[in-house]
Image (cartoon, rainbow, N blue to C red):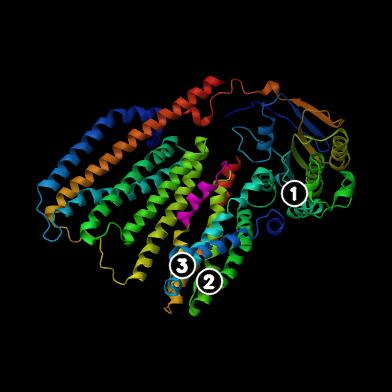
Amino acid sequence: MIALLLRDLRLATRAGGGFGLGLVFFLIVVVLVPFGVGPETAILSKIASGILWVAALLAALLSLDRIFALDFEDGALTLIATAPIPLEAMGLAKATAHWLTTGLPLTIAAPILGVLLQLPNSGYSIVALTLLLGTPALSMIGTFGAALTVGIRRGGLLLSLLVLPLYIPTLIFGAEAARRGTAGLDATTPLLMLAGITAGCIALLPFATAAVLRINLR
Amino acid sequence: MSLWEYANPKKFMGWTGPILPWAFGAAGLCLVVGLFWGFFLTPDDFRQGSTVKIIYLHVPAALMAINAWMMMLVASLIWLVRRHHVSALAAKAAAPVGITMTLIALMTGAIWGQPMWGTYWAWDPRLTSFLILFLFYLGYMALWAAIDDPDTAADLTSVLCMVGSVFALLSRYAVNFWNQGLHQGASLSLDKEENVSDVFFFPLLVCIAGFVLLFFALVLLRTRTEIRARRVRALQLSEVR
Amino acid sequence: MPVLSNVSFDVEAGLALILRGPNGIGKTTLLRTLAGLQEPVAGTCDFPADQAAYASHADGIKTALTVRENLAFWADVYGNTVPDAIWDWFDLADLRDRFAGTLSAGQKRRVGLARLGVINRKVLFLDEPTVSLDGFSVKLFSNFIRDQHLANGGIAVIATHIDLGLDEATTLDLTPFAAADFGPSDSDEAFL
């Protein structure tokens, strides 16, 4: 499992691995928002935490179809499925690799981009904290969606359609916690719910991922 | 003889054929009686006027929108455990009916909301939940449409239905939490049953019965269509060989 | 749907079985079933499952990794290290630090086959392993199977159209085992 994780990280950072694309997308969305809603500081600072969450979610979505598709095309997925790695562990390794190359960089970049959106000073740590707690769930849910659509040609759009509704609870609790924290309110409840969703996803979704992979590799 | 034998496609076609017209007839009767009673024989509400009468469409549709998803979940589980083809096809057949019910609930809600709240759309927790349910239906149907092999499609959509159910439930709680967070003690309450008096309630019951029967009849019809489509496919395949 | 029926064979340790038959007869299906990727419609297979490995011509070699990294990954997955001799077995000594993306198709396939040398499994199910190999590479491959794999008590079931020149191999032509008239698949049958 560690071997698979290391290989995926190495592949992501090599040429053509797509590492950083998500970050650039994140940056561009954040830059576009003020063009859309106008430059007033008051409006921007009010919606900053929410925009950062939605933009991070979309950036995480962008790289999902790479999780299994490349390995499926060149046969590596079949070989890994017959190797002594449980498919559940493989799903977890894939999600971890996706998080390390997407979720974690987004979490680190979010406070920096918060400056562009006039994020209030109280918001920087809470936005980073909620993203740190929430992005693993996004990666795990996305891995499940990628496994579901791995056998479908040009499944990228379908993948988004399937995964985005599943992202709703994570987004709601994550953005709500960030909003409350930024406004100086108590954000304990949504933070706990967010952590609960992430823990639940990591505990249960590898099994669903393995189940759909088995069906798709039949 | 086990109950499951009725789930054999041929047996299923046999016993559902004669039931179908009766199901449609009963649904039509209940709907005509219930809607006529509700629209013309009940008094206008003192506060909402005649707009209140949209509950005779809104409430039963909303009820069936959720029940259709539940039925799909049960059918998916039966398929995964017992691998009865009719079960998978019934789940597939229920989805378009369910999404239509969701759409009816959303649209009647919007039409009702305009005179009541002065807006077609409010991010009320219940309305939002139904919008999310609508998205789940879309994803489920899109996955069915995207896969060629019927058994693979049935397997994958069943897993999606199970995982989706958990997340749909989570979304429901999340949305409740989220809106409360926005404006404490929201004044836009959609809780009608509490305020509904008997004079509105009995025609509503008839309408609900009508919608249940209509759902049953439509799903039966669509399942039979799906079975026939599968039969055509099987015949074509066996001819090619 | 049943593709083959009444197929039965034993392979002794140290021997290979070559599967033959026209395209579409079910060689791939048989090998995938043996490898556990799909369930048999009926019947059993008996071999130490923790000693089996599967390979096809889609060998999952990553172009963005070097040859050494590719092999090290598979060695790691199977809990081994890459044996030094592997570079000679498959004539990869000069290529080991090249990115797999810069190799020719045949060289890349040799890396894919070298995977069999690092995973060190006794029972190999190989589906068309020699696709896009030249005569020299085929020789390297059959030498490896004979001298490293079979000589150490390994077993190989190989679907191929060419002559590998293995004396230790028996040949099984699958043509007579084609399922009578392909009958309807399990799931279609219910609807007929």
Task: Give the residue pinned by disc 3.
Answer: A50
**Residue B53: x and y, percent?**
17, 51
Q: CA distance from mark 1 to mark 2?
A: 39 Å
| Amino acid marked by disc 1 | Thr
> Spatial distance from mark 3 to mark 1, Cα to Cα?
39 Å
Residue found at x 29% / y 36%: B217
Residue A83 seen: yes
Q: Position of residue B207 (x, y in %)?
A: 20, 45
Q: Are marks 1 and 2 on the same chain?
A: no
Q: Secondary structure at mark 2?
A: helix
Q: Which residue is mark 1?
A: C63
- From the image, give the main secondary structure of the stretch colored magenta: helix
Along the line of sight, the residue nearer the viewer: B62 or B75: B62
Q: On the rendered image, what quadrant is the C terminus of chain B found in? A: top right
Which picture quadrant has residue B225? top left
Residue range of the region highlighted in magenta in the rendering: A151-166
Tell me if mark 2 has few (under 14), some (14-19) or many (20+) residues whose alpha carbon lies within 10 angstroms of its own: some
According to the picture, the residue beneath numbered tag 2 turns out to be A116
For residue C14, the mark is none
Mark 2 residue type: Leu
SS of the residue under disc 3: helix
Tag 3 and tag 2 share a subunit: yes
- Chain identity of mark 3: A
